[in-house]
Each structure stands twice: as structure tokens, then as C-alpha cells.
Image: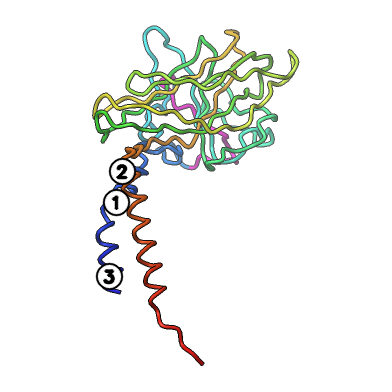
Amino acid sequence: MKRALMLGAAFAPLLAVGAQAGTNLVQNGSFSMNTLPSPLNPSNASGAEIDSLWNYNGDLTDWSSTASLSNPQLYNILFTGTLAADTSINPDTRYTSSEPQYLNANVNSLSPDGGAFVGLDGDPNFTGALTQTITGLTKGQEYQLSFYWAGGELFNRTGYTSIQLTGSLGGDPFATPVYLNTNPAGTPGSFSGWTLETFDFTANATSEALSFLAVGSPAANLPPFALLDGVSLTAVPEPSTWAMMLAGFGGLGFAAFRRRRRTPVAII
């Protein structure tokens, strides 16, 4: 028993390194925390605009969606954890700039991350970034960014062509594949389904901006929407660290094997 405890103590730092590598540095990556008026629930609203055109910019905890002088119009929406495409909800316009905004009936799946998710308008005339400043980075350290995304369209629009989710971390860009609407013109746009995307980055500073931007077509107020949820940024362990951890676990296993071999067998 004493030997096992000593081995465990010896490899505790390696376990700590592994835990640290798995820590998500993105705050509120599930979009579950907000300071929106209460109640905001499926009985009267499917979502709320969280951009600078509306009163609730800044109400999505840890995230910002601010227009620029070059693009003063943007529409980014926080959807509740219910299926936003349920047209029987009769959404309340209090939480949107001009009209109820919920997804069409083809959007038939909630995010695999569960709960709330964000929709970013991909119309070039109305697109705007969703951003968060990531702190606690180590310069030169490799990190993996992961998130779920999907493409779709609002309930009262038809005819979008394409949608893509792009962005950057510390100025280094990333982009998902382009999703093309598969439904005929004049009918509600198709839903891509949710996809998990991962990208690797090397930190250039201890604090960097993470930004997401929807890119779609056409520019005709037929807004293709990029849906986003489950955002995570974690450190990638160095190969030497993985080797040390594997060697450590191998040592623990060998010690346990030897201990089992030495245990006397009772003869009845």
C-alpha cells in the first residue's frame, strides 16, 4: 500500500498537467449565462437580439456583438434552449428590433451541446462579429479551438444560397466549409445539421481576441444564419508531456501487476 501511495504522489504532477491542458479558457462557451430580462421563455419569445442595434447588447455574459462604422447594421440572436423553429410559440417582438425572429421548421435539431445557442446573420449587409477576449494564454503554447455550428434560415425568409462560419483567434483566421442551400428557390431554406469543428492555434500573446463572423449569400435580406454553440479553447499538451504521462501510467500499471503477482494464493 505504501509503495502504491508513493507512486501516486510521484505522478500527481503529471495528472495536474493533463487536467490543466483540458481546461476550457472560453467563458460561457455554451451561451447559457445572460442578464436578459426575466422571464425570457418559450411561452413569449424564442430569442433575443444581443447586438448593438438593440438594448440587449452586453446581456450575453462574457460576449460582445458591436457594430462598426463601416458596418453599422448587424443581427445576432441568442436563442433559448427550446427548438426555436416552433411557430406555435408566437414569439414576442420585445426582444427583437422589429419582428419576431425564429428559425424555420427545417431547423429540426437542437445543438448537441444542449441549452441555448447563438444565431449569426450571414447577409453581407447585416453581418457582425461575436467576440470575446481570451486571457490566461501562454505565448508559444498550442491550443485547440472547437465548436458546434450549423446553417439555416429564419422562418419568414426564403431563398438563401450559402452560409459559412468564419473567425479568428489573435488575428489568425479559421473557417468552416461552406454549406449550400439544397431546397428550391422560393421555399424555406434547408438545414445543414450540426457539425463539430476543431482548429489548432499557437498563442502569440497572453491575451487574444476570439471572433466569430457569419458569411452568407445573397445580399438580399434572405438571411442565411450560422448557428453556434459549445465553444471551447484548450491547451494541447506537448509531445514530451504526453510521453511522460504515458510512461508514468505504464509505471503504475507495472507496479500493480507485480503486486498482484506477489499476492499469496490461499490453498483450500
Coloring basis for residues: rainbow
Which class describes the residues within 10 Å of circle 1: few (<14), some (14-19), or many (20+)? some
Q: What stretch is highlighted in magenta?
A: 39-53
Say which mark, if any, is on residue 151: none
Which class describes the residues within 10 Å of circle 3: few (<14), some (14-19), or many (20+)? few
In percent of width and height, residue 247 lies at 34, 51
Q: Is residue 231 left or right of residue 46?
A: left
Q: Residue at x 71, y 21 (%)?
A: 188
Mark 1 or mark 2, earlier in chain: 1
Task: Tell me which corner region of the image, top left, top right, bottom left or bottom right, holds residue 128.
Answer: top left
Q: Residue at x 52, y 22 (%)?
A: 176
In percent of width and height, residue 250 lies at 37, 56
- According to the picture, the residue beneath numbered tag 1 turns out to be 14
- According to the picture, the residue beneath numbered tag 2 turns out to be 241
Q: Residue furthest bottom?
A: 268
Which class describes the residues within 10 Å of circle 2: few (<14), some (14-19), or many (20+)? some
Q: Which residue is drawn at 68% across and 32% down?
A: 87
Q: Distance between the residues labelled 1 and 3?
A: 18 Å
Q: Cβ–Cβ below 8 Å for labels 1 and 2?
A: yes
Amino acid bearing label 2: Thr
- According to the picture, the residue beneath numbered tag 3 turns out to be 3
Determine the main secondary structure of the stretch shown in magenta.
Answer: loop
For label 3, the SS is helix
Q: Is residue 123 left or right of residue 237?
A: right
In percent of width and height, residue 56 lies at 42, 29
For label 1, the SS is helix
Taking depth in this image into account, of 1 and 206 the one nearest to the observer is 1
Taking depth in this image into account, of 235 and 208 the one nearest to the observer is 235
Q: How far apart are marks 2 and 3 (CA)?
A: 24 Å
Mark 2 or mark 3, earlier in chain: 3
